[in-house]
Image (spheres, rainbow, N blue to C red):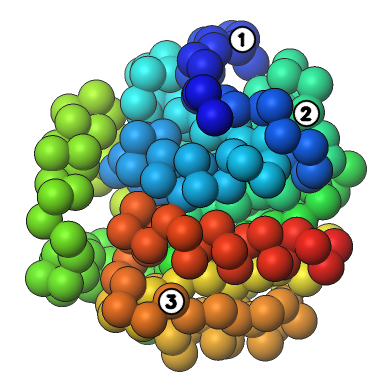
Amino acid sequence: MIFHRRWTLARGLRIHDVAAEEASGVPVVLVHGLAVSHRYLMPTARALAARHPVVVPDLPGFGLSDKPSGAYDVGEHADHLAAWLDARTMGPVCLVGHSFGAEVAARLAVHRPDVVAGVVLASPTTDPRARTRRGLIGRWLLDTLVEAPWQAPILARDVADAKPWRVLATVGHSVRNEVEKDLLRLPVPPLVLGGSLDSVAPLTWRTAVAEMTAGTSVTIPGAAHNALTTSPHRAATAITTYLSHL
């Protein structure tokens, strides 16, 4: 499948995405985390594209999207993502949010259930046991010890695009967000996906998320926090299986 770039005006900002929309089925929208962009989600996007239309946007301030003067919180990102979906005339879609993107996906699903067919919470933040800047950053540092080193150039480019101050500010927004309030109101039971080595969103937290949402938990053996980058085929299989039961 060939992915094409597009910029779409939403709430006054140009939002960049890459998309392969030739396949049939429920469209899948992959939502990235707080320090990155569409780039690290492309392995799973490519693995999904033969079976579902796939679109991977950059949130405002990240990747190739416009850069607002401030760092948006969860609600602001959800509002922009909803406006982008409306402008792209997409929906209902399956939202696949990774890490901080799972917080954004959950908020969007609660506020705009009309555009949501399914929700995948991949390595969702933030575990209440690490809901501080120090706790979350500490877990990320632990995760780097088990992540595949070939990801480093992608991360470096994404942080350079976003600027370190925006990344740090978004960490603050993440740990101040009580994600449980949104999880308890999800309009559909989610798939909760993560790696067995994930120290950022460990199995105990993912299990709790699945229990409180009546969702299904799937663990990818040998994968860490960035399972959608390093284990794309297993992640895509879990997502397509979930979609087949909607």
Disc 3 marks a residue whose amino acid type is Ile
Q: Residue 35 appears at what percent x and percent y? A: 29, 43
**Which residue is depicted at the point 62% across and 41% down?**
50
Q: Residue at x 82, y 51 (%)?
A: 117
| Nearer-N-terminus badge (3/1) | 1
Check the image and report above or below for 89 versus 179.
Answer: above
Instruction: Please state, as top left, top right, bottom left or bottom right, where the N terminus lies in the image.
Output: top right
Q: Nearer the viewer, mark 3 or mark 1?
A: 3
Query: What is the number of the mark on residue 9?
Result: 1
Find residue 222 and report its horizontal and vertical position in percent: 30, 78
Q: CA distance from mark 1 to mark 2?
A: 14 Å
Q: Type of residue at label 1?
A: Leu
Q: Is residue 28 above or below residue 199?
A: above
Which residue has dot 2 on it?
A: 90
**What's the mark number on residue 220?**
3
Q: Amino acid at mark 2?
A: Met
Provide the secondary structure element on which disc 2 rests: loop
Relative placement, left or right, of 209 versus 26 is: left
Q: Position of residue 175 (x, y in %)?
A: 40, 62
- Whether tag 3 and tag 2 are in contact, CB under 8 A, the answer is no
Residue 111 lies, in percent from the top left, at 78, 47
Question: Could you say which is closer to the camera, residue 12 or residue 119?
Answer: 119
Q: Residue furthest right?
A: 114
Q: Nearer the viewer, mark 1 or mark 2?
A: 2
Disc 3/disc 2 C-alpha distance (Å): 29 Å
As drawn, the label of residue 167 is: none
Answer few, some or many: residues within 10 Å of disc 2's Cα (few below 14, many 20 plus, some between 14 and 19).
some
